[in-house]
Image: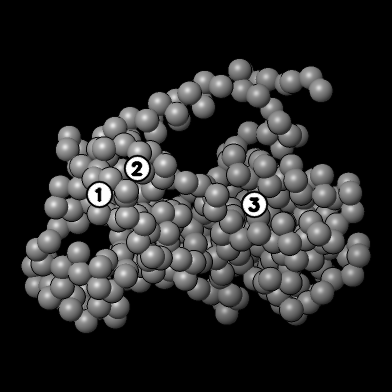
């Protein structure tokens, strides 16, 4: 098979020809929904009660109700999915952890064709990289004129595509496989096979007004938490390591039942009640103790990333980080 490149970037599937902007991702998902009935059925089943019959669903991209010369700003929807008389879904798609504001969602909800539609079920979905718990806590509005506004993550879309693949035809499987490869390269999706360890520094003193230290949270409660996004991971890592008292103390696999919270007192009575930005709360798996002492010397950042195996053979975190960086650089060149 011959290789295809665009501006020195190798193209592995047809969806990459579009690009990786918000509209490009929306077009790709909509195409797959239209061409893969099992994927469409799985997607609809996850959000609404109605089960459409073959051929009765309309999917529209970049739909505007404005007529030529009309200066009213009704807004252009990213994706619309409709079965006339049965259901009508408007989807606003975002790349990254951006969420639409109240005005934008109200604009969609007040469009005459949507507001006055007599469909049994109506819904506004917000697609983003945000996990549902985070999005629920940060969306400015949960309904427009009584029509629910619900968040869905791109990760969930990919999960539904994988589930639908098993029941799809060979042609549909090819579309889904290419979509999944495209999504994994275009949006942030946790790789459950990653061996990267997120390493954080812990203090042994109790923060002001706290009655528990960070070390006790890890060692006694088998928990850890941090803000979602910005300079912190926006998706839970597979592994997390803790350094204190001058060395790496332990590495833990993060269990699946993590949570998102905004009030620490609800999880730890020893911490005063306060409104925080959303935080991930992890349940830590059994400790992996390095077979040799791994010192923390020459570490500038309070948190960083290293490959798991490098932490088991290097004698300092700095060396493990150096080996990790060299591997990543070599992989990007290859």
Residue 214: x %, y % from top left:
20, 64
State the residue in front, 109 or 295. Answer: 295
Helix, strand or loop at label 2? It is helix
The residue to which callout 1 is attached is: 248
| Cα distance in 3D space between marks 2 and 3 | 45 Å
Left or right: where does residue 8 sit relative to residue 228? Answer: right
Q: Earlier in the sequence, mark 3 or mark 1?
A: 3
The residue to which callout 2 is attached is: 311
Residue 16: x %, y % from top left:
68, 34
Residue 332: x %, y % from top left:
51, 26
**Whether residue 64 is situated above or below residue 324 in the rendered picture:** below
Left or right: where does residue 192 sit relative to residue 273? Answer: right
Left or right: where does residue 263 sit relative to residue 65? Answer: left
Labelled disc at residue 78: 3
The scheme the figure's colours follow is one colour
Visible residue check, residue 108: no
Helix, strand or loop at label 1? It is strand
Q: Residue furthest front?
A: 291
* Residue displayed at 71% across by 75% down: 48
Q: Residues within 10 Å of mark 1 (few under 14, many from 20)?
A: many
* Residue displayed at 39% across by 48% down: 197
Visible residue check, residue 57: yes
| Cα distance in 3D space between marks 3 and 1 | 47 Å
């Amino acid at each position: 098979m011959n290789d295809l490149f665009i501006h020195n970037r190798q193209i592995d599937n047809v969806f990459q020809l579009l690009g990786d902007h918000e509209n490009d991702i929306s077009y790709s998902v909509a195409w797959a929904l239209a061409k893969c009935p099992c994927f469409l059925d799985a997607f609809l089943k996850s959000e609404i009660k109605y089960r459409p019959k073959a051929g009765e669903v309309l999917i529209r991209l970049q739909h505007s109700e404005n007529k030529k010369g009309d200066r009213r700003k009704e807004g252009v929807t990213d994706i619309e999915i409709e079965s006339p008389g049965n259901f009508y879904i408007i989807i606003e798609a975002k790349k990254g952890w951006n969420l639409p504001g109240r005005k934008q969602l109200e604009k969609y909800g007040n469009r005459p064709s949507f507001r006055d539609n007599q469909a049994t079920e109506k819904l506004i979905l917000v697609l983003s990289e945000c996990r549902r718990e985070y999005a629920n806590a940060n969306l400015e509005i949960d309904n427009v004129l009584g029509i629910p506004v619900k968040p869905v993550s791109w990760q969930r879309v990919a999960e539904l595509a994988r589930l639908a693949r098993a029941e799809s035809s060979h042609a549909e499987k090819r579309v889904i496989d290419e979509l999944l490869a495209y999504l994994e390269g275009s949006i942030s999706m946790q790789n459950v096979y990653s061996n990267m360890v997120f390493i954080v520094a812990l203090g042994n003193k109790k923060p002001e007004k706290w009655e528990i230290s960070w070390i006790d949270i890890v060692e006694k409660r088998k928990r850890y938490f941090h803000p979602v996004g910005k300079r912190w991971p926006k998706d839970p890592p597979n592994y997390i390591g803790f350094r204190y008292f001058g060395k790496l103390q332990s590495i833990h696999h993060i269990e699946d039942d993590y949570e998102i919270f905004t009030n620490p007192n609800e999880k730890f009575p020893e911490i005063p009640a306060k409104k925080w930005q959303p935080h991930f709360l992890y349940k830590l798996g059994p400790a992996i103790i390095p077979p040799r002492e791994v010192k923390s010397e020459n570490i500038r950042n309070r948190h960083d990333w290293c490959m798991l195996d490098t932490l088991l053979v290097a004698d300092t975190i700095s060396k493990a980080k150096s080996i990790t960086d060299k591997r990543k650089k070599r992989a990007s060149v290859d």
